[in-house]
Image (spheres, rainbow, N blue to C red):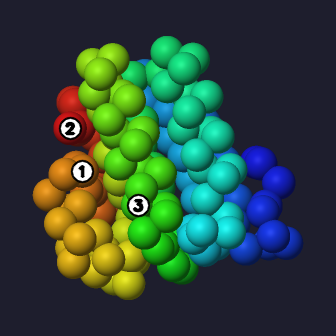
């Protein structure tokens, strides 16, 4: 697991499940803590990963900076024929995605197990 940014506020753990890279997030994803996620997603895309899944089940809060990190990664992946999906959004995080319309841009799954069961996520 990557060391948390700002004490124990945020951390990113990356693991492989078949051909999917799963990013498990914990804590609060905001302007002050987004860099570990940005770095992990960028490294994955530059390293040739094409199917990414971001597990939000441990995220208490996500602001527009976190959303922008995901949108940027989505664009980079699409240019390479890849995809990124989200799983486990809490009601508060799901609301932010719904209000911004981002829930229509990403494939959103109730949890990691459901997402991994999909043959392909968008």
From mark 3 to mark 2, how far is it between C-alphas?
A: 17 Å
Mark 1 lies on residue:
106
Mark 2 lies on residue:
122
Relative height, residue 5 to residue 85 (above, below): below
* SS at mark 2 in the image: loop
From mark 2 to mark 1, how far is it between C-alphas?
A: 7 Å
Label 2 neighbourhood size at 10 Å, few (<14), some (14-19), many (20+)? some
Instruction: State left or right for residue 102 relative to residue 13.
Output: left
Judging depth in this view, the residue of 76 and 13 nearest the camera is: 76
Furthest-left residue in this view: 104
Task: Check whether the beta carbons of the residues at disc 2 and disc 1 lie within 8 A of each other.
Answer: yes
Query: Residue drawn 56% across and 33% down?
Result: 42
Residue 56 visible in the shown view:
no
Instruction: State left or right for residue 6 relative to residue 56.
Output: right
Mark 3 lies on residue:
67
Image coordinates for residue 122, horizontal then vertical, percent: 20, 38
Label 3 neighbourhood size at 10 Å, few (<14), some (14-19), many (20+)? some
From mark 1 to mark 3, how far is it between C-alphas?
A: 11 Å
Query: Residue drawn 79% across and 61% down?
Result: 4
């Amino acid at each position: 697991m990557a060391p948390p940014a700002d004490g124990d506020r945020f951390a990113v753990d990356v693991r492989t499940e078949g051909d999917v890279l799963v990013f498990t997030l914990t804590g609060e994803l905001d302007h002050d803590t987004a860099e570990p996620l940005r770095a992990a997603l960028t490294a994955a895309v530059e390293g040739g990963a094409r199917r990414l899944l971001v597990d939000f089940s441990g995220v208490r809060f996500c602001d527009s900076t976190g959303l922008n990190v995901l949108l940027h990664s989505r664009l980079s992946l699409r240019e390479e024929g890849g995809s990124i999906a989200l799983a486990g959004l809490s009601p508060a995080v799901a609301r932010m995605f719904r209000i911004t319309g981002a829930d229509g841009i990403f494939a959103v799954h109730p949890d990691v197990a459901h997402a991994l069961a999909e043959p392909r996520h968008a």
